[in-house]
Image (cartoon, helix red, strand yellow):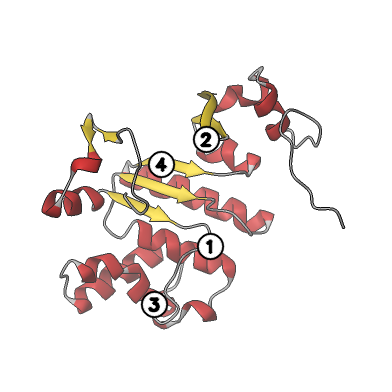
Amino acid sequence: MSLIPHTSGSIEVDGRDVTTFRGDERIAFLDRIGMTFQRSGLFDSMTTWENVAFQLVQEGMNPSEAKDRAIEKLTAVGLEAATADLYPAELSGGMQKRVGLARAIATDPEILFLDEPTAGLDPIMTNIINELILEIVGQLGATVVSITSDMSSLKVISQRVAMIHEGQIIWDGATKDVETSGNPYVDQFVHSRAEGPIEMAVAAL
């Protein structure tokens, strides 16, 4: 998405290097993508509907039409229409996650990037968000790429998984095989073991 410029190599989607896209071609490509941020990433000074419709308005959609689309997407993630006029500070953590998801699907994207979609949520809300993700993916027919450290969510929302350690993919395969990968790094992470090849730096008190 070029939020952070790449330093080397290429990023290919559908066989094309997207880092070469410029102008209208880049805008058209970004319209195919939706993204949620780990901490929701909502604009505090904007109402909920303005957050959801941000990209639509930026691209020239009439504000009235954009609000209607935003309310439609808020409803799709299980929020009432009245939520549209609230500000992020008036929403719970779980509601903010839903608003972030509504914004991500505002353009009906083909690809969804989810950054720790259930981080900071209690188990019940985690399950609700996971079910929403599955429902939305089913409706849009979108491909989802999610970063997660929540093993329970991993098993629900994914079909394939890759583990990155020190900047390298060290294992990838079907989600059903992750617990029997045979990779000591993956095994330690999946089973939350303190002992293993992954060493965590802990500051002395």
**Nearest to the observer: residue 167 or residue 193:** 167
Q: Is 74 located above or below residue 162 in the figure?
A: below
How many numbered marks are there? 4
Q: Nearer the viewer, mark 2 or mark 1?
A: 2
Residue drawn at 53 percent across, 54 percent down: 129
Give me the C-alpha separation between circle 2 and circle 4.
21 Å
Residue at the left extreme, as displayed: 24
Give me the C-alpha separation between circle 4 and circle 1.
18 Å
Residue 170: x percent and y percent? 56, 25
Give me the C-alpha separation between circle 2 and circle 1.
22 Å
Give the residue at mark 3.
Answer: 84
Q: Is 154 located above or below residue 129 in the figure?
A: above
Residue 179: x percent and y percent? 67, 25
Judging from the image, what secondary structure is the residue with disc 2 in? loop
Residue drawn at 23 percent across, 66 percent down: 56
Give me the C-alpha separation between circle 4 and circle 3.
26 Å
**Nearest to the observer: residue 55 or residue 141:** 55
- On the rendered structure, is 107 left or right of 195? left
Q: Nearer the viewer, mark 1 or mark 3?
A: 1
Residue 29: x percent and y percent? 21, 47
Judging from the image, what secondary structure is the residue with disc 3 in? helix
Give the residue at mark 2.
Answer: 167
Give the residue at mark 1.
Answer: 39
What amino acid does circle 1 point to? Answer: Arg
Judging from the image, what secondary structure is the residue with disc 1 in? loop
